[in-house]
Image: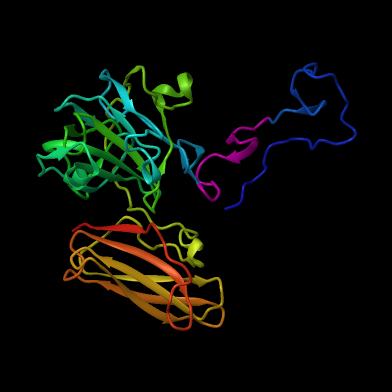
Amino acid sequence: MKRWRVGLWVMVGAALPACARGRCGEGTVDVGRECVPTLQCGEGTVDVDGLCWPEGDACGLGTVSRGGQCWSLSVQPAGLPFPAGDAYDVTQGNHGYYSHSDEDVYAVDFNTPEGSEVAAMRAGRVLAARDDSNTGCGDESCADQANYVILDHGDGTRSHYLHLQLDGALVEPGQLVGKGEVIGLSGNTGWSSGPHLHVEFDDPLGMSLPIAFDELLELSDGLAYAGEVFESQNEAEPAPAAMDWSECPEDLFLFMGVWVEPGLPCAAVAPDTELSVSGLVVPRTGKVSIATFSDTRGEWFYECAPTSTEGDFTVNVTLGSQRYVNTAYLMVAAADSNCYTLQGWDASVSLFIVP
């Protein structure tokens, strides 16, 4: 949806009086030596990036409405990932040399002893959980030994809580959880050089997103950093009565030349789901490729279909349990006349199989 300009404001023009820098009167601001009226948002609207937006759901592309305000999906509002009153320091923050690079660049590690309670940073629905591991080590070879909880937040984002102890996942896939609710017990499993809790928010392609912790907004614009102990104010809230699984944004596969219709799952599917993928191929190549990666066979499978002369398509893909037991990876791409995609990809959507 487009941003609505609903407040009263004045464009800078020749009629505005010039004034010395810093000498603008009340209700104005100095912009390039011109006194410009400041933006005054009316009742029922909120100032977002210098524009008056209606409160509620009238948020634009790349934003989502939370608490009557439009938040950028690139910065995630969150509570600290432990119950109110608990306090821990950061052992590795954003861009950490040890392991916070590439897709995990915005992850945060907290110095939590084994058995420490882990709380949901935001309300969500449990997408996946594991707690059968009791092993780990200090290098990447042990990464697949980590216990974890993953929450889907219904807006295309997920939060991850890693390195939980054996039997340390206290929730089940499909369960609704409230912000601040205890969902696990921290540990030392997987790629871990010592007991700690790793948290991050991801977009639908698994790329980490910056986190703005509620408790740190005044201190550091929400950024958690090493060198200080942070006390949680993340009070437990009731779980939401209902929450839909995330759907893929219409522009998610645009880097592969495809718009998708709303409704395409982007988090969870039931076993043996028939996935219906519709959309528009932007380059008029005449073909579309739907690729899914099988977790049981360790290979990609491709469905190639023609498009209309306008580029429209609908393809049905069965995610049968003989190929997809826990996870199916998904990619939608424009394809040439021989059904080859026009480029490769380094990230794809993970669809968890949730009964």
The relative height of residue 343 versus residue 327 in the rendered view (above or below) is below
Figure quadrant of the C terminus: bottom left
Query: Magenta residues, as a range?
Result: 40-62
Check the image and report above or below for 119 versus 317.
above
Q: Depth check: 94 or 27 in front?
A: 94
Rendered view: 332 above or below 227: below
Q: Quadrant of residue 338?
A: bottom left
Residues 166 and 279: in front is: 166
Residue 39 in which image quadrant? top right
Expressed as whole percent of the image width and height from the top left, the position of residue 172 reads 17, 46
Q: Position of residue 241 (x, y in %)?
A: 28, 43
Identify whether 40 is placed above or below 230. Answer: below
The colour style of the image is rainbow
Percent across and percent down for residue 204 are 39, 53
Q: Is residue 170 left or right of residue 221?
A: left
- Left or right: 71 in relation to 188: right
When asked about the image quadrant of residue 353, the answer is: bottom left
Residue occupying the point 36% across, 34% down: 97
Q: How many marks?
A: 0
x and y percentages locating residue 108 in the rendered image = 34, 32
> Magenta stretch: residue 52 in it?
yes
Question: What residue is drawn where x is 56% and y is 73%?
Answer: 283
Q: Is residue 169 visible?
A: no
Position of 25 with respect to 342 (left or right) is right
Residue at point 26%, 38% (across, down): 161
Prevalent SS, magenta region? loop
**Residue 91 magenta-highlighted:** no
**Residue 89 showing in the rendered view:** yes
